[in-house]
Image: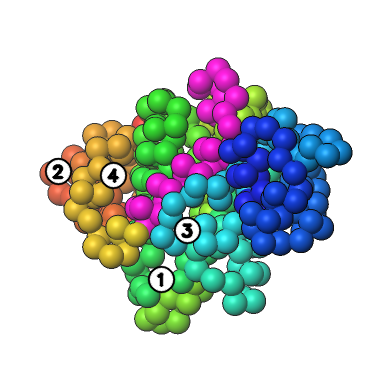
Amino acid sequence: MKEKVLSLLKESGEYISGEQISEAFGVSRSAVWKAVKALRQEGYEIDSVTNKGYRLVKMPNILSSAQISQGLDTQLVGSRIAVIHTVDSTNDEVKRQAANGADSGLVVIAEEQTAGKGRLGRSWKSAPGGIYFSILLRPELAPADVPGITLAVGLAVCLAIREFTGCEAMIKWPNDIIIGRKKICGILTEMAAQTDMVDYVVVGAGINVNNKSFAPEISQKATSLYIETGGELELSKLMQSVLKHIDERIGSYLTSVSIDDAKLYKSLCATIGRNVSLERGDKKIEGTATDITFDGKLIITLADGSTLEVGSGEVTVQGIY
Ligand code: BTN
């Protein structure tokens, strides 16, 4: 109802009476009042004048499920959108909801996380200004095919950032998004699975959007869209664009494992062509990243011309943070 009332107020631009709104949606005046109250709580300035009705005065630059859902034309992602002001970790929140039977496509978004999780057991700094979100998927996939979902999400976020900001975002394999040498987004995928079948997948991403600065320990490695563009971005609009792109790329991965997407991923992958190193046991291996396989593994060419396929683990890329 909140979304519907918001869209009517936006469309009208003028005062619109509670009666007109309740008639338009076939609900009671008190339901309209509740929706207005909820919108105000989210920061919308809505004027109300006796005998005239309601008028939308100002939209807040916040993550609002009403703003994000409005006009969001997706097949799966965003079937339900929940915005939580502060949460421990959106990945953990989605896992809790998954355990309670939540449907595929659920998106949980937070403005701040108190226990944000990064890859390899690291923590993820999640101060206000960024967007922290996780998506629940219940794909009919074998566990081995899940990394492809992460790559698809990385590609989608990269494309959305490029389209929305004009910044030349690139992908650091497998799924960090960078601008220049610094990280703008990280992705953490977790799953619950049987041996041969996935129960659910949670893909979580943190995007540095309107963050003005970073803690000293990460300021050399991290950047934000605010720092890159010099201005604040509309959080809900960006989120909508990100969800739209993710829906398209996941849809394409789950239905066809598209060759075009693999090509696009490679063309935006900053790792290719760079010198890389990785640790295998107590050995340090160095080479040049030369390609990505169709199933998303990195191919490293060593000095003797032999090649190595890397499926996971930490690859250090020279020249990127
Ligand atoms: C990384 O690069 O190490 C991955 C970072 C992933 C962070 C996101 S923020 C939203 C979601 N919830 C979490 O706790 N982590 C992911």
Gap between marks 2 and 3 measured at Cα? 45 Å
Contact, mark 1 vs mark 3 (Cβ under 8 Å)? no
Along the line of sight, which residue is nearer the eye, 288 or 145? 145
> Is 227 a magenta residue?
yes
The residue at which mark 2 appears reads as: 304
Question: Where does the image place residue 196, in percent across and percent down from the top left?
Answer: 37, 81
> Where does the N terminus fall, quadrant-wise?
bottom right
First in sequence, mark 1 or 3: give its number.
3
Q: Quadrant of residue 236?
A: top right
From this viewpoint, is residue 166 visible?
A: yes
Q: Nearer the viewer, mark 1 or mark 2?
A: 1
Residue 236 located within the stretch drawn in magenta: yes
The magenta region covers 224-250
Q: Which mark is residue 77?
A: 3
Give the residue at mark 4. Answer: 265
Q: Earlier in the sequence, mark 3 or mark 4?
A: 3
Give amino acid for label 2: Asp
Disc 1: which residue = 139
- Front-most of residues 65 and 115: 65
